[in-house]
DNA sequence: ATAAAAATTGCAAGAAACAGCAAAAAAGAA
DNA sequence: TTCTTTTTTGCTGTTTCTTGCAATTTTTAT
């Protein structure tokens, strides 16, 4: 077996599974551990893979140490950056809960002057810290699972509000299923929030695209803008661009 | 299973749920608790997550003031322990804000069954985490200084409540000046909370005894119970025992 | 206050990595 | 072909890394 041949097989394995183990390759290629180690060292020097104790992982699999933030969080941050650009002074905005919304609250410019309503205590605290805008927390029964206020009190307060924008995170976004959620209470709140605002901005990481959860929030037609970390021209979003007015 | 693999899985879990438990990961990954602990330590050193007792939380969910353990001076904890003993099942209680109240929220027994109203998002989150009781957050404009909800909305919601107990922290307690506060808005809220409850429990560390602030909340006669970290028979409290029905 | 759960520390067994060396294989030259 | 040179491979002993265990301390729950 040629050296080059082994290298190709190793690369194929890594691209397929994201990782390889030294002993696994040893069995697969019927050569000694040392040979495999030397192979891995060479491939690493070429810059194709990253060696770790026990084997090697693909470059995309490996998170460099300099990057202190977690990958999904980077994506969420990118989404929040795009969404926050929609904020204009004197705007009245409704904010949902979830981690993307927390990122958004964190990114609100200090000089932004507007009114922010939210059902999430965490988002409220973050927004109040980071901006001089008015932050109004819509109170109600606090759900320990979702960390947002739920129940009739929230619904009735929402019905008294007329907001310009409603920013929501999505747990499931699909062409057929629309926007879906795994918690019934949360779905109700989101529905009502959308009714209380002129326009709805839905934020979804691409992982959640074409994912369908148990509880329906709305059809895609009800969305005015879909924000993902992807480029709006990405092929994964092609079919969405026909249904939703604006992609970011 | 490669170490890197475990790390990736842990990060994914944290991003998905916001938190992980050591034992949960132990079951999921089929390795010993020690290995999980070491993994979490490494990920924390990388800056990806924040370790807490029992597991780890996502950096996004981790808000600096959510870990008031640093402020949790022994005295405040002692006060909270005494106060929490006043809670009985099926009780409706109003909770104020502040660090003592956070300690109280943390000490609420898991089996306590009652209804808790609060104007503080932090207290609400803590209480919802630590007990199976119903937690209702009274929403309103969030004050960035005091981290509690203020304004007319809170006042009007409070006027619709009839609670058994009202638990408040005090920033100033004196024989002549009564209970005082440095923030006008907060003083208004506290006044209204007291009116909405049958009995008021005031919690004050001895540092704040004989301290007078600018804004008056009430006279000492309006207090049903004063809780301090001192022994009720302490001579510093002697003159208070004549005015207040109960000392703890 | 007491009991239970979790964290920390030190340690030892096992697995993997490393370095040097020698045998085997491959390549090139006479 | 045969000999020499170079490269590759496998082996050995040593070192490093990882993991799980036990004892102890700290934190949390009751």
Image (tube, coloured by chain):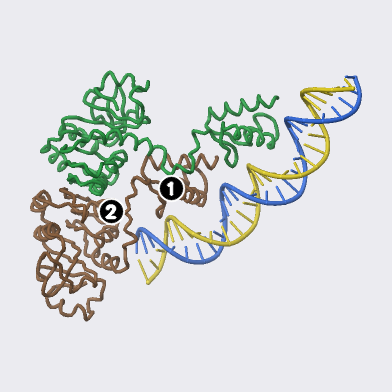
Chain colours: A green, B brown, C yellow, D blue
Residue B211, placed above or below residue A12:
below
Q: Which mark is residue B47?
A: 1
Q: Which mark is residue B92?
A: none
Residue A198: percent from left, percent from top:
16, 30
Q: Earlier in the sequence, mark 1 or mark 2?
A: 1
Q: Quadrant of residue A192?
A: top left
Residue under disc 1 on the same chain as residue under disc 2: yes
* D9 displayed left or right of B193: right
Q: Tell me if label 1 and label 2 are in contact, CB under 8 Å.
A: no
Q: Residues within 10 Å of mark 2 (few under 14, many from 20)?
A: many
The residue nearer to you, when weighing B23 against A67, is: A67
Q: Quadrant of residue A231?
A: top left
Q: Which chain is disc 1 placed on?
A: B
The residue nearer to you, when weighing B25 against A117, is: A117
Local secondary structure at mark 2: helix
Question: According to the image, label 2 marks what residue?
Answer: B126
Callout in the foreground (1, 2): 1
* B245 displayed left or right of A30: left
User: Which quarter of the rendering shows the N terminus of chain B?
Assistant: top right
Q: Which chain is disc 2 placed on?
A: B
Q: Residues within 10 Å of mark 1 (few under 14, many from 20)?
A: some
Residue visible at 52% across and 34% down? A59
Q: Quadrant of residue A150?
A: top left
């Amino acid at each position: 077996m040629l050296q080059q041949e082994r290298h190709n097989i190793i690369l194929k394995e890594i691209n397929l599974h994201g990782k390889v183990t030294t002993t696994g390759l040893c069995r697969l290629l019927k050569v000694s551990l040392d040979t495999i180690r030397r192979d891995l060292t060479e491939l690493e020097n070429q810059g194709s893979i990253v060696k770790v104790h026990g084997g090697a992982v693909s470059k995309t699999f490996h998170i460099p140490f300099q990057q202190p933030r977690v990958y999904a969080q980077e994506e969420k941050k990118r989404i929040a950056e795009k969404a926050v650009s929609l904020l204009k002074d004197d705007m009245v905005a409704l904010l949902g809960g979830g981690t993307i919304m927390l990122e958004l609250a964190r990114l609100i410019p200090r000089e932004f002057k507007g009114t922010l309503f939210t059902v999430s205590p965490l988002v409220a605290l973050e927004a109040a810290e980071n901006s001089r805008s008015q932050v109004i927390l819509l109170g109600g029964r606090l759900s320990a699972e979702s960390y947002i206020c739920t129940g009739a009190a929230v619904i009735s307060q929402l019905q008294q509000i007329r907001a310009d924008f409603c920013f929501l995170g999505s747990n499931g976004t699909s062409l057929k299923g629309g926007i879906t959620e795994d918690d019934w209470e949360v779905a109700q709140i989101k529905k009502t929030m959308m009714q209380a605002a002129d326009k709805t901005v839905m934020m979804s990481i691409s992982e959640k695209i074409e994912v369908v959860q148990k509880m329906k929030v709305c059809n895609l037609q009800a969305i005015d803008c879909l924000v993902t970390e992807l480029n709006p021209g990405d092929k994964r979003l092609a079919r969405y661009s026909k249904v939703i007015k604006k992609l970011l």
